Image: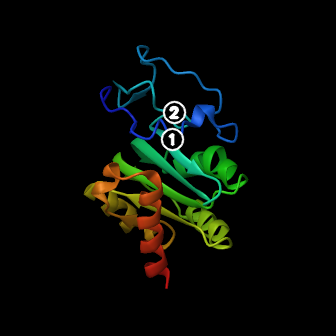
């Protein structure tokens, strides 16, 4: 897992640690010191810790004019024990929402497991974003994690989409594709 680093091809366009509006503004990273783990496996030091012991993230791109953020995730999403959705909401997405972000693309291809609890934080998030015409889309979540996500009926609030070619596009094109998909889906 230490070889799985966050997507880096957009770093010339945006870095959260240099964005004064980002929750990670000013954060310093080591390329050699591995301190965070998932399942006792060290993960790459470029991943950001946000309060969960099993889930880490990287804000890959934020566009305040278009009101969207693209966030990559790695680890185990565990609402049952860790209440990861509450931590993600309160410490990351609510802070971005206050800065005008109401469309979230979560890259979930490295979310190894999903364990649900109740849906209240998802429902609350959906209602908050819906007022502004916003949404949450998870891209490329593994099939087993998708199954658990769907079984918990969370697709009422968060949309799942397979979009494997996202890495070949610039962030604005990824957003345009997802936004167009959401316009068609919500129409």
Distance from Cα at disc 2 to Cα at disc 1: 18 Å
Q: Quadrant of residue 162?
A: bottom left
Nearer to me, 18 or 54 = 18
Nearer to me, 58 or 80 = 58
Percent coordinates x, y for residue 116 in the rendering: 45, 56
Percent coordinates x, y for residue 169 in the rendering: 36, 53
Identify the residue at image location x=28%, y=56%.
Answer: 164
Q: Check disc 2 and report its element: helix, strand or loop.
A: loop
Nearer to me, 160 or 30 = 30
- Mark 2 / mark 1, whichever is N-terminal: 1
Percent coordinates x, y for residue 17 in the rendering: 59, 31
Q: How many marks?
A: 2
Left of 168 or right of it: where is 87? right
Q: Farthest residue toward the top?
A: 32
Circle 1 residue: 13
Mark 1 nearby-residue class (10 Å; few <14, some 14–19, many ≥20): few
Quarter of the image with the N terminus is top left
Q: Check disc 1 and report its element: helix, strand or loop.
A: loop
Asked whether the viewer can see residue 83, the reply is: no
Kindly identify which numbered label has been placed on residue 48.
2
Identify the residue at image location x=41%, y=51%.
Answer: 170
Reply above or below: 36 against 163.
above
Nearer to me, 140 or 173 = 173
Reply above or below: 142 against 28.
below
Percent coordinates x, y for residue 84 in the rendering: 53, 47
Left of 172 or right of it: where is 140? left
Reply above or below: 124 against 93.
below
């Amino acid at each position: 897992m230490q070889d799985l680093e966050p997507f880096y091809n957009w770093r010339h366009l945006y870095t959260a640690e240099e964005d004064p509006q980002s929750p990670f503004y000013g954060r310093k990273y080591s390329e050699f010191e591995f301190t965070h783990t998932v399942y006792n496996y060290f993960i790459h030091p470029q991943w950001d810790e946000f309060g969960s012991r099993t889930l880490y993230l990287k804000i890959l791109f934020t566009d305040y004019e278009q009101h969207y953020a693209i966030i990559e995730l790695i680890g185990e999403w565990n609402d049952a024990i860790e209440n990861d959705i509450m931590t993600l909401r309160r410490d990351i997405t609510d802070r971005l929402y206050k800065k005008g972000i109401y469309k979230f693309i979560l890259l979930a291809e490295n979310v190894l497991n999903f364990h649900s609890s109740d849906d209240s934080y998802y429902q609350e998030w959906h209602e908050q974003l819906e007022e502004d015409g916003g949404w949450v889309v998870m891209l490329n979540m593994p099939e087993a994690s998708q199954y658990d996500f769907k079984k918990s009926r969370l697709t009422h609030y968060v949309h799942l989409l397979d979009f494997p070619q996202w890495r070949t596009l610039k962030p604005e094109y990824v957003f345009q594709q997802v936004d167009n998909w959401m316009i068609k889906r919500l129409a």
